[in-house]
Structure formats: structure tokens, C-alpha cells
């Protein structure tokens, strides 16, 4: 009976502090969105360079991507924050670290999507007096962006969960908030707090995946029939 009462008190503690957890959730969402956008801004041109760039530019982009993908995110964050001190803001530093690492993966998503568009379409566009740049921009890129949605969906989910690593530089995102509640010594609700945190991550991931599934279906490139 005492155990049941203690567990009920632990859940009441979680409910009473739900405002703090929601505040951490807002930080997590903001960090995810900012990092994904930075990853797109850097990753899409990088992917295009790997497909259409000169040999030298392609090699440089490929080597940078290999380094970013092969370096643990924790190490990247610590180098940028404690080593290079690129910003006094932990949020900005975490955004850059997550964004650059995401860009390295997004570049491969977009590279594959660009290469999946048949070369005959590029040649057809050139045949109607489009320049190479115009053909890529108006014919290849729109199709590539549509085909990249499934891969982008997976990357969004990964970045969302990776925001928890920003705890190492003190950002008050969702996991940090939950840990602070427990370590504050106000309650023994360790399990309940982290169950609540896990539930929030699940809801965010599920909602994102379902939204991107619909986006993928809506913008799917029609396949020809035989």
C-alpha cells in the first residue's frame, strides 16, 4: 500500500512540474527545427556539388562530409563550445553542431535524390534551349526534393533525438529539464520523470513522421505505367 501511495505521489510530482517539462520541450523543438534548417541550407548545395560540381569541389565536399559523419556529435559540440568557442550562446553552438552534422547526412540524401532523376530529362531540357543550370533548377531539383522526403523524415527524427546530447553544454532542453527535476532531490520520481520525457519524445517523433508521411504521399512523383 505504501509503495502504491509513493508511486502516486511521484506521478503527482511529474504532473505538478509538467510546465517545466513543456518548457524543455519547446527548447527541444526550437533546437531541432533550427538545426534541420541549417542542415538543409548547407546540405542541399553540398549534395548538388557532389553530383554536378567539379572534381576538386566534389572531393573537398566529400572529405568534409566524411569527417563530420565519422566524428561523434558529442565531440563536435565540445570542440565548437570549449575548443573554438564559436559563440557564447550554448543554443547557437548546439544548433551549429547539430546542423553541420545533419548537413553531412542530408547531403547524401539529396545526392541520391538528384542522381535518381533520369539523365534523359536533363538532356530533354537542354534540347529546348534551357541552360544546364536552368535544367537542373527547374527539372531535376523539384523531382529530387520530392524523392528526398523519406530520407529527410528519418534525418529529422535522428536530429530530434540527438538534441538530448546538448545536455553537455547545459542547454535546458527536454532531457536536461527532466534530469534536473530528479537531481534536485525534491522527489524519488526518477522512473516517472523519464517515462514522461520518453512519452514526449515519442509524441514528437510520431507526429513528425505522420506529417512527413502525408507530405511524401502528397508530393510523390507520379510513376509511369506500362
Image: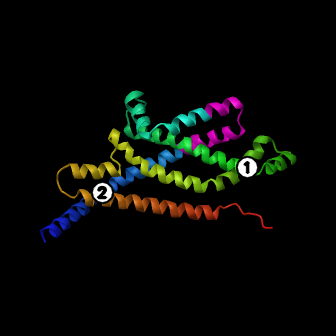
Tell which residue pokes out farthest to the bottom in this image.
1
Dots 2, 1 in contact, CB < 8 A: no
Tell which residue pokes out farthest to the left in this image.
2
Q: Residues within 10 Å of mark 1 (few under 14, many from 20)?
A: many
Q: For the point 23% across and 61% down, which residue is it?
A: 16
Point out residue 22 in the picture as x, y percentages from the top left corner: 33, 57
How far apart are labels 2 and 1 at the CA level? 45 Å
Looking at the magenta stretch, what is its main secondary structure? Answer: helix
Position of residue 12 in the picture relative to residue 25 (left or right): left
Q: For the point 78% across and 67% down, which residue is it?
A: 225
Point out residue 9 in the picture as x, y percentages from the top left corner: 18, 65
For mark 1, what is the residue? 140
Looking at the rendered image, the quarter that the C terminus falls into is: bottom right
For mark 2, what is the residue? 194
Q: Is residue 48 magenta?
A: yes
Position of residue 37 in the picture relative to residue 54 (left or right): left
Which portion, as a residue range, is magenta?
38-61
Nearest to the observer: residue 29 or residue 78: 78
Amino acid at each position: 500500500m505504501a509503495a502504491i501511495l509513493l508511486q502516486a505521489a511521484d506521478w503527482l510530482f511529474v504532473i505538478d512540474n509538467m510546465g517545466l517539462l513543456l518548457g524543455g520541450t519547446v527548447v527541444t523543438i526550437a533546437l531541432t527545427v533550427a538545426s534541420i534548417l541549417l542542415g538543409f541550407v548547407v546540405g542541399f548545395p553540398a549534395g548538388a556539388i557532389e553530383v554536378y560540381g567539379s572534381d576538386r569541389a566534389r572531393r573537398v565536399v566529400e572529405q568534409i562530409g566524411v569527417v563530420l559523419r565519422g566524428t561523434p556529435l558529442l565531440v563536435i559540440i565540445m570542440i565548437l563550445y570549449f575548443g573554438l568557442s564559436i559563440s557564447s550562446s550554448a543554443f547557437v553552438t548546439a544548433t551549429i553542431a547539430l546542423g553541420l552534422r545533419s548537413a553531412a547526412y542530408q547531403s547524401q540524401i539529396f545526392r541520391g535524390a538528384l542522381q535518381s532523376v533520369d539523365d534523359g530529362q536533363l538532356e530533354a531540357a537542354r534540347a529546348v534551349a534551357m541552360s544546364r543550370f536552368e535544367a537542373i533548377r527547374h527539372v531535376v531539383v523539384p523531382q529530387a526534393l520530392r524523392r528526398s522526403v523519406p530520407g529527410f523524415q528519418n534525418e529529422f527524427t535522428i536530429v530530434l533525438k540527438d538534441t538530448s546530447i546538448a545536455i553537455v553544454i547545459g542547454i535546458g532542453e527536454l532531457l536536461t529539464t527532466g534530469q534536473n527535476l530528479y537531481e534536485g532531490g525534491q522527489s524519488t520520481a526518477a522512473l516517472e520523470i523519464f517515462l514522461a520525457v520518453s512519452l514526449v519524445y515519442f509524441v514528437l517523433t510520431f507526429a513528425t513522421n505522420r506529417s512527413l508521411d502525408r507530405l511524401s504521399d502528397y508530393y510523390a512523383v507520379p510513376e509511369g505505367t506500362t
